Image (cartoon, rainbow, N blue to C red):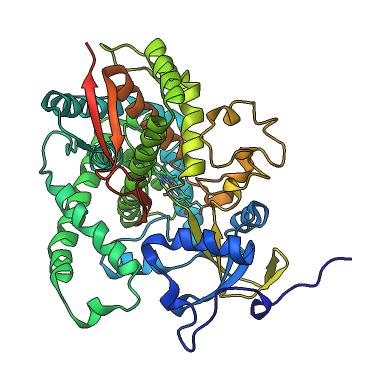
Amino acid sequence: MTPALRDFDQLPGPPLWPVVGNLLHVQPARLHLQLEAWCRQYGPVFRLRLGRFGRVVVLGDHGPIAQLLRDRPDGFRRTSRVQDIWTEMGLLPGVFGANGEVWQRQRRMVMHGFDPAHVRGYHPQLQRVAQRLVARWRLAAAGGGDIDLQADLMRFTVDAIAGLAFGAEVDTLSSDEDVIQRHLNRLFPILFRRVFSPLPWWRWVPNADNRALRESVPAIHAAVDGFIRQARDRLHADPARRAAPGNLLEAMLVAADAPDSGIDDAQVAGNVLTMLLAGEDTTANTLAWLIHLLWLNPAELARVRDEVRAVCCVDQAPSLDQLARLEHLEACTHEAMRLKPVAPMNALQALRPTELAGVRIEPGMVVMAAMRHDPMRDELVPHASAFEPDRWRGEGGPAEAAHHPKRVSMPFGAGPRICPGRYLALLEIKTAMAALLTHFDIAHVGTANGQPPEEVLHLAMAPRGLRMRLQARG
Ligand code: HEM
């Protein structure tokens, strides 16, 4: 007999307080850890009442989570929080927050930019950025000092993504001042503060954030308009570039120019900024976690190091073919993303009545996926808390098996809105790791007090306070 459907009010969950429900229980910077702890306490389907989010059903099982993520765009949309705040800050919207038909059009355009042939075209630029990372780390190694790991990796991904997105050389690795980046650096912390703020205080008490926005938003729009003009000029001067665009912006403009694309330059500009937002912290934090996990697992570090040194040379940037041969590095990256997913939750809003995990879902209800609950269960992933990259190399059983880690761990999401930047992110990760391991020996990775790094949820989940020390080779 099929079990009866449960209503929201029949679900277990943390005790509710009058009026505020669970709102005061929530600690934004560690919400993912709270969701995971509640999954263990109340089971993988429970309820929260969270202020403006209202009624929230939390899911921890990978099956219903996959069902949720696949039921888009018709069944569920992204909650509008990030996009509303982004728009209120005066920024042009992009694919991440778009829904319905607008999303479909923008997604088509964005996917054109991530076409594997185009991503291959960005490779030389990525290698130039990697050379600057090596130069920066050589200086740090010569000085014998500690490297602020997450901050330096952010410089790498900022330069990589800004270069690919704008088609302009942005260099935060060699100089601390890059004008567009200085303005962008102001935006993202403000966005983060506002997304997690329980009240919209900035509307009532204008402060330094509001002043920064008044200066930075027009400057960013002027810069992006300039990049679009330059890209259009390049496409006009050399029509052959339309078949082989040199960067994401050119590729998006080509797609936008298709007869029935329904896309204008404002939407292209919004998506250039969206790429920066979605692609910088996520990739930098994944790299930081990967390096830390390898340091904690010396046998795996030795395997990856030997693989990289066997395939890549010190005096030449690796080709795409060489990067493709770094299979153990790729397995370690998947394993790092299972243990430390930088997007550990995904909140969606129901557009129509449906059911998930035996619960009746009503339109408007928020369903939150706790992405790391199942990937940490020994019943599904043997020795789940251990770093065992071989599980990604066939030893985990056939890839189509229900419990293969590929099905249980979904660091890039799933379904029609799966991360379009995932291949580019893997390419960046391999490029940075190849640069690190061909040019340096790692002398130490850890926090100042020797404790495991705390997981902090900003827009992406980051390790707090990781330092690295390097010795240059040769
Ligand atoms: C390791 C690095 C990255 C991780 C772990 C990651 C993870 C994610 C996740 C979990 C989502 C939501 C997927 C869903 O709702 O099912 C997403 C969406 C997205 N990501 Fe990434 N991402 C990474 C890198 C990138 C990069 C490098 C870019 C672009 C340069 C990018 C662009 C986007 C965009 C545009 C979306 C929204 C897609 C849509 O709504 O249709 N991401 N990413």
- In which image quadrant can residue 160 be found? top left
Q: Quadrant of residue 425?
A: top left
Horizontal side, residue 58 vs residue 425: left or right: right
Q: Which residue is pictured at 17% across the width and 36% down the height?
A: 171
Residue in the picture at 31% in, 31% down? 246
Quarter of the image that includes the N terminus: bottom right
Residue 253 in picture, x, y percent from top left: 35, 44
Q: 196 above or below 303? A: below
Q: Is residue 229 above or below residue 42?
A: above
Q: Residue furthest bottom?
A: 18
Residue 366 shows in the view? yes
Where residue 138 appears, x then y in whole percent?
17, 24
Is residue 75 or residue 48 the one in the foreground? 48
Q: Is residue 260 visible?
A: no
Residue 203, compared with residue 253, is above or below; it is below
Residue located at (42% from left, 19% from top): 302
Q: Is residue 206 left or right of residue 312?
A: left
Q: Nearer the viewer, residue 261 or 440?
A: 440
Is 11 placed above or below 324 here?
below
Question: Where in the figure is residue 369, as x and y percent of width and height?
Answer: 55, 59
Residue 129 horizontal/vertical position (percent): 24, 29
Residue at x 18% of width, y 35% of height: 173
Give the total number of marks visible in the rendering.
0
Check the picture and name the quadrant holding the C terminus: top left
Task: Please indicate whether residue 186 sits to the left or right of residue 400 in the image.
Answer: left
